[in-house]
Image: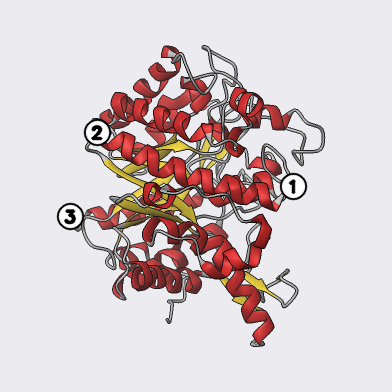
Amino acid sequence: MKLLDTAHVDPGTLAQAFPPNFLWGVATSAAQIEGAAFEDGKGASIWDHFCRQPGRIKDASNIDVACDHYHRYREDVALMKSLGLDCYRFSFAWPRVQPLGHGAWNEAGFAFYDRLIDSLLEAGLQPHGTLYHWDLPQALDEGIGGWLSREVVGRFADYGAEIARRFGDRLASIATHNEPWCTATLGYETAQFAPGHTSRAESLQVAHHLMLSHGDAITAMRAVTKTKLGIVLNHTPSFPATPTEADRRAARIDDGLNVRWYMDPIFRGAYPADALDHVGADAPHIEPGDLDRIRQPLDFLGINFYTRSLFGADGKTVQGPGERGFTDMGWEIVPEVFAQHLVRLAREYNPPPMYITENGMANADRIVDRPEPHVPDEERIAYLAAHLQALATAMSLGADVRGYFYWSLLDNFEWNSGYDKRFGLVHVDYESQQRLLKDSAHWYRDFIAHHHARR
């Protein structure tokens, strides 16, 4: 797949590669931007707790204030409107609307999302909601063991049904989970994310409970809303570091634990046999009927893409050549892999319409004061243009993709990296909370304007 040289790509030319009804948006998550961590009846999340454990967050920061979106959402919606966006993807904070993860609902929390959704609709933006972007109520973690407990599955389905009942008529879509691989692997196996466990067996059992809760939530929401329902998966395609059989096997196993572990039960009703064989005694306990509950018809599939992984025979990742460079997270920039992977998904799984629900780069951005304050993030513009061109290529080869959400609208709390990594189209001064559109935001705005002119 040959991609264009994007060094000086014209947004108007690139915009012509997308059908007129294609949707353009941005994405965020509650824990990363909302702040107001303990206001208006919100309960603690596992990330509120995790941030207070010494050594967990690289800059020792927390999410008490973050981007103060809870109080500044109108300003942020106005920014989105100024960019000409079609849609906005956000997540609900479960502990904001149900502090204990069961029992009483917090009406003040629901009122915030009422105001946010109304503001989006008034600005002409489609609201796309996500039920779970990693901020489990801390009370559930302490009370029943969080995602390790099968009991959480029913709690999550009840939560999803209540969100759908209250907001389904105003939401363009609802996703159950964002990146369950991260919840399971980074939260329960590598301890990089909350709650900070280090057990592969726990991670795989959590992954199964996440999948089961997804299926049950889809069923529960279908009973109360007609809005589009789906899930958001993060895919980091795996490749052998060398063309040896050992390296190929290592990459295939990672593909089984990363891509197929979540795609197969949803679309094929089974976990991949080679991955199950590889994990051995760490395989999750699966009860009769579980896989039927997971395999629910979906209206859409969200795909988050950032980079790829190269694997050596020892199963460890190898640094790629970085022909297009690396992001500030150290992730190799590989838009051609983005195109290849979307075509693979289309051919192997025949999924429902796909949306690119996250794609973006962390960059070492800086404000330059001349001739007036601005952020010259040419690297992000090149990244964005290259991935949009790759997306157009994949669509021309049969991938049914209906929309693209850049990650992220705002610089924000980047989980265990704290506030050091900046993914936003909008620069945030965390002391003053002042927002400033980066050069990439202006490029994206111009690109969208060219596309909208074709409608």
Q: Report the residue at 58% width, 37% height from top.
A: 147
Type of amino acid under label 3: Arg
| Residue furthest right in the image | 54
Question: In screen coordinates, is 229 left or right of 237?
Answer: left
Q: Nearer the viewer, residue 238 or 72?
A: 238
State whether residue 371 is above or below residue 40.
below
x 45%, y 65%: residue: 387
Amino acid type, callout 1: Thr
Relative placement, left or right, of 139 versus 169 is right
Q: Between marks 3 and 1, how big is the CA–CA gap?
A: 51 Å
Q: How far apart, in angstroms, are the residues tagged by discs 2 and 3?
A: 29 Å
Task: Name the residue furthest left.
Answer: 455
Q: Position of residue 419 (x, y in %)?
A: 67, 39
**What residue is pinned by disc 2?**
225
Above/below status of 441 relative to 379: above
Left or right: residue 43 versus residue 59 is: left
The residue that appears at 42% across and 52% down in the rendered structure is 291
Helix, strand or loop under label 1: loop
Residue on which disc 3 sits: 455
Q: Amino acid at mark 2?
A: Thr
Question: Which of the labelled discs sits on residue 198, or is there none?
Answer: 1
Mark 3 is surrounded, within 10 Å at the Cα level, by few (under 14), some (14 to 19) or many (20 or more) other residues, namely few
**Is tag 3's residue or tag 1's residue first in the polypeptide sequence?**
1
Residue 258 drawn at (x, y percent): 56, 61
Quadrant where the N terminus lies? Answer: bottom left
Location of residue 65 in the rendering, given as x and y in whole percent from the top left corner: 61, 24
Viewer-closest of 242 and 414: 242
